[in-house]
Structure formats: structure tokens, C-alpha cells
Amino acid sequence: MSYIPIKRPKFSLQDRIYVVELAKGLWITLQHLVLSLLGKSRFKKDFNGKGIGVCMPFPEQRWDAHLPSYYRGAPALVRGEDDRERCVSCQLCEFICPARAIRVVPGSVDSSSPTPKQEKAPVEFEIDMLRCIYCGMCQEVCPEQAIFLSNQYLLTLTDRSKAVRTKEDLYRLGGTKKGLINKWNQYK
Ligand code: SF4
Ligand code: SF4
């Protein structure tokens, strides 16, 4: 059996005892503590916090407007500008998903469809949100730019069976995405 030897990086003494990294972390915590006690915490205004520190009354108040553009929340399916399902049910995302959270049932597309070149679309597409680890590998692998990690992070359930998001749920969450996919661009 062939194998590829991997060179492990050598750790210095400092790396091995990680006291410096520990001290750096504590220093940051201490800075936040002092700022908080002085009533000068970062984003104090945005939080509309009460008292000396900062306390956001979640869920009535949320931090959503401050989420960075690269925030990776729950995965969602998207439609194209022409309202076409971008997903062609190739099942690559299902295959790559490390948590085995995705289930795709492929189906064929009617030849009378405005995009007959697209031979397949999912009949069913489910993501079990109790399994999903928000890794983004489904987004990375998708050849059709059909699945993206949205900025939705809330998962409040009273019943475990409701954790499975159906195709309809996923399209509702993803909405429409602008931008061409080369395969469907008539000029390509
Ligand atoms: S984000 Fe990761 S774990 Fe979640 S469905 Fe996609 S590939 Fe699977
Ligand atoms: S979302 Fe993308 S990777 Fe997953 S089945 Fe659809 S086209 Fe394939």
C-alpha cells in the first residue's frame, strides 16, 4: 500500500507549554473587563446595554445587523434570477457533507421547461440541522452555486423532528441569488 509521509512541524518549547498564548488570552479578557467596569465597552451604544457592562437582552434584541458578510450560518438553497432552481441534484453536497446531514432525491426536468439543458432537479432535498456543523463544504463543492451558507443562526426547537429542513424551507431561506453561472450563460 502506498502512502505519503507528512512532515510534522517542530514545536518550540514555547509552543509546547503554551503559557504565552494563555497569557495573551487572559490579557484580552482583562482588557474587556476593565473597559466594561469603566462603562466603555466596545459597541456599548449598539447593545443599548444597561448597568456598567454590556448585556444584550436576547432574543428581543439581536446582533444581526453587525454580522460580517463572511458569516457562515445555516445552509440554504437558492433560485436563479429567472426563478429556476439552481440545484441539479448532482448529490455532490450529499457526498461531501462530513456530518451526513444532507439527503437529496434526484428527479428529471420536463423537456418543456425553459431550461431543458438542465436535465435534473431535486424532488426532495433535506438538511438535518441537528447534524449540520456549518462547515460550508456543501457550498464549496456545489458546481451550480445552488447552496450557500446564509446568515441565519437561530435554531430553536421544541421537537427534534422539526430540525429537518425540507426543500421548501431551504428555498424560503435562500431566496434568489443574482449572478450568472457559466453553464447557463447563453454566451458561453
Ligand atoms: S454546512 Fe457542512 S455539515 Fe452542514 S450541510 Fe453543508 S456540508 Fe453538511
Ligand atoms: S446543491 Fe449543488 S452540489 Fe448539492 S445536489 Fe444541488 S447542484 Fe449538486
Image (cartoon, rainbow, N blue to C red):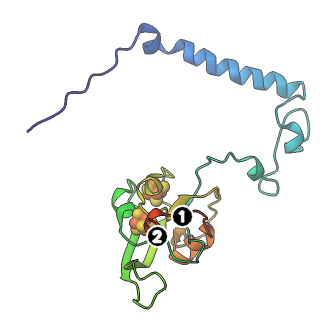
Query: Residue flagged by tag 2: what amino acid is it?
Result: Trp
Rendering coords of residue 44 (x, y %): 86, 37
Give the left or right position of residue 139, taking residue 32 as reference.
left
> Circle 1 sits on which residue?
180
Q: In this view, does 188 lie above or below 23?
A: below
Give the left or right position of residue 13, taking residue 44 as reference.
left
Give the left or right position of residue 126, taking residue 10 as reference.
right
Is 133 in front, or is 82?
Answer: 82
- On the rendered image, what quadrant is the C terminus found in? bottom left
Q: Hey, which residue is sitting farthest bottom in the picture?
A: 112
Rendering coords of residue 78 (x, y %): 56, 68
Residue in the picture at 90% in, 40% down: 45
Residue 107 visible in this rendered orientation of the protein: yes
Residue in the picture at 48% in, 68% down: 185
Rendering coords of residue 164 (x, y %): 50, 70
**Can you tell which quarter of the image residue 28 is in?**
top right
Query: Label 1 near label 2: C-beta < 8 Å?
Result: yes
The disc at residue 184 is 2
Q: Hey, which residue is sitting farthest left in the picture?
A: 1
Rendering coords of residue 129 (x, y %): 51, 62
Give the left or right position of residue 120, taking residue 180 as reference.
left
- Few, some or many residues within 10 Å of mark 1 (<14, 14–19, 20+): few
Q: How far apart are marks 2 and 1 (CA)?
A: 7 Å
Q: Hey, which residue is sitting farthest top in the picture?
A: 13
Query: Residue flagged by tag 1: what amino acid is it?
Result: Leu
- On the rendered image, what quadrant is the N terminus found in? top left
Labels in figure, total: 2
Check disc 1 and report its element: helix, strand or loop: loop
Ligand 2 resides in the quarter of the picture at bottom left
**Can you tell which quarter of the image residue 118 is in?**
bottom left
Check disc 2 and report its element: helix, strand or loop: helix
- Few, some or many residues within 10 Å of mark 2 (<14, 14–19, 20+): few
